[in-house]
Image (tube, rainbow, N blue to C red):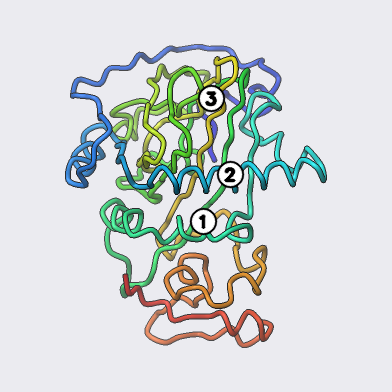
Amino acid sequence: MAIGDAVRMEDYKDNHAATIRRVPVAFEGPLPRPTRSLEQVKIDLDQAGYAILTDVLTADEVREARQVLVDEIAREEAIDENRVRRFFTDPDDKNRRLSRLPNRHHWFRDFLEHPVALHLTKHILGPTLLNEGYLVHSYGANLTRPGSGEQFIHLDRGMDFRDQQKPLQSRFIWCLDPFEEANGATRVVPGSHRWNDRIDMTGGTYYESLAAEAPAGSLIIYSDMLLHGTGANTSQDRERAGVIVGYCPPWCRPMINFPLVLDPTVMAGTSRTLRQLLGYSSVSIGFDEQWDSASDELRALCVPATMDY
């Protein structure tokens, strides 16, 4: 994850970075509003760089998935609090971050292969070479707690891709609470997905932003081209839980090598689509190179690379 407002990560963590230039929000079009329309989502993505799709999860599904997330965080805290805090982009220790989600519960596996997310990934990233499946680039959960600070505005990509003309990641936030400005809703810079040659990732530029407010059960959709960041939770007693996933083309190296960190017994019996997304397939370049030196457990999980969704 590249840094935005801070010149260096060390300066950001120590609060030493000086603001040299301030960029106001200057988006002229209508701001995206929560919608049930996939077509409106595509329009909003094109115009503003982000969109909010409502009613993707029912109230019961939100409640169950959120309880699973809270229970998993509590379990990790009981072992060692540092396992779920001190994420390198958070300004303090109040937020809670959870990783290795597919190991933990079927909810976190279901999110990855949800048809809406896959449909919009196709729209954002476009076709793949030889129709290979996309890969999960990164996957985690973020629970902002009252008093947690604002994350710096950043891009979810490499440090300085000024010649990047189209997204290399589709990004989704599953909202397990209402996302509101007071409880740390994700902040966005509308229209910044078109600023590729004007985004300063090397100097002390501060980007003004807006809260992407969304009801529980929604998906916030964007790409690695959009400036954004976790908001400050200024509420007295309200948490804000979100599950964040990014997908990338099959030729792009994911942040996590999932077959090395996931439990193969958990993955046994999962769908071909999920295993493709998590990297349990070879890359097809006219022939299929099998995982001959892998363990029997891993080889049993391998699936063909061709997308069938």
Residue assigned mark 2:
67
Residue assigned mark 1:
107
Residue furthest to the right: 79
Residue at point 29% right, 37% down? Answer: 51
Up/down of 108 relative to 172, above or below: below
Residue assigned mark 3:
152
What kind of residue is marked 2?
Gln
Residue at point 37% right, 27% down? Answer: 212
**Tag 2 or tag 1, which sits nearer the N-term?**
2
Up/down of 137 relative to 98, above or below: below
| SS for callout 2 | helix
Quarter of the image for residue 190 reads top left
Foreground residue, 206 or 276?
276
What kind of residue is marked 3?
Phe
Quarter of the image for residue 130 reads bottom left
Which quadrant holds the N terminus?
top right
What kind of residue is marked 1?
Trp
**Tag 3 or tag 1, which sits nearer the N-term?**
1
Lateral position of residue 205 relative to residue 266, left or right? left
Residue at point 37% right, 31% down? Answer: 214
Mark 1 touching mark 3, by CB under 8 A?
A: no
Up/down of 148 relative to 219, above or below: above
Marks 1/3: CA–CA distance: 29 Å
* Image coords of residue 111 (percent x, y): 45, 55
Foreground residue, 90 or 39?
39
Foreground residue, 177 or 151?
177
Lateral position of residue 91 relative to residue 114, left or right? right
* Image coords of residue 149 (percent x, y): 60, 20
Viewer-nearest of discs 1 and 2: 2
